[in-house]
Image: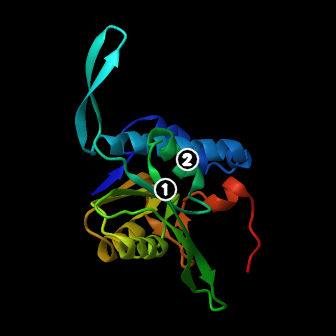
Amino acid sequence: MIVNLSSTNSLVGEWLSEIRSMEIQQDRMRFRRNMERVGEIAAYEISKTLEYEEKEVQTPLGIANCRVLKQQPVLATILRAGLALHQGLVHYFDKADHAFISAYRKHNHDGTFDINLEYVSSPTIEDQVVIISDPMLATGASLVKTIEHLQDIGKPKHIHLVVAIACTIGIEYVQRHANNNMTIWAGDIDDELTAKGYIVPGLGDAGDLAFGNKLQN
């Protein structure tokens, strides 16, 4: 299942226009905050799909019957670019456990690249709902490798992918190679991918825009 959060009119479109804007991108704090906002909206929408149970709560005047989450999801993100989007999810799922994955493109001299995954820190995910955040779903290679590694740790009940911008090619790749028990939540979806694996029009390098340019290996 794929959900494009920009398919209907909402503030998501406003925030994404700022996330994409070369002028507004110069304000690093604003860029991160807008990423957080997309994560917050995704968290709210995902919360509607989760399981709930009844709970009696004592108020100053009596007993209230409330509906609360039956089980907290596990929030996973890909370092470093996913941190701002992840933080937006944390604002809503503030009791969740967290997983962190270091997955990045290792560029080769011939212009190709490999996906290196060097660090994983994760709680148990067996029969858990897992929400993975990564700003850009471009080729889909890093997300597929991340999912495969997490599934070696445990078999999730359901996986939600939260991305700011997705490319149709990357979506198709993830659907072909990853767990079918999955929902993709995208702030917006673009159709073009360059030969070097960058989304057009996209937004640029989300990690650099959020945290500063990195040294090239």
Quadrant where the N terminus sits is bottom left
Residue located beneath label 1 in the image: 98
Element on which disc 2 rests = helix
Residue located beneath label 2 in the image: 87
Q: Where 122 falls versus 68 (above or below)?
A: below
Q: Are marks 2 and 1 in contact (CB under 8 Å)?
A: no
Q: Amino acid at mark 1?
A: His
Tag count:
2
Q: Where 59 falls versus 146 (above or below)?
A: above
Residue 65, horizontal then vertical, whole percent: 24, 23
Residue 45, horizontal then vertical, whole percent: 35, 41
> In the image, is 178 to the left or to the right of 92?
left
Residue 91, horizontal then vertical, whole percent: 51, 40
- Determine the CA span between mark 2 and mark 1: 11 Å
Hey, which quadrant is residue 66 in on the image? top left
- Quick check: can you spot residue 204? no
Residue at 27%, 18% in the rendered image? 64
Q: Relative to the observer, which residue lies in front, 164 or 54? A: 54
Q: Amino acid at mark 2?
A: Gln
Q: Where 119 falls versus 124 (above or below)?
A: below
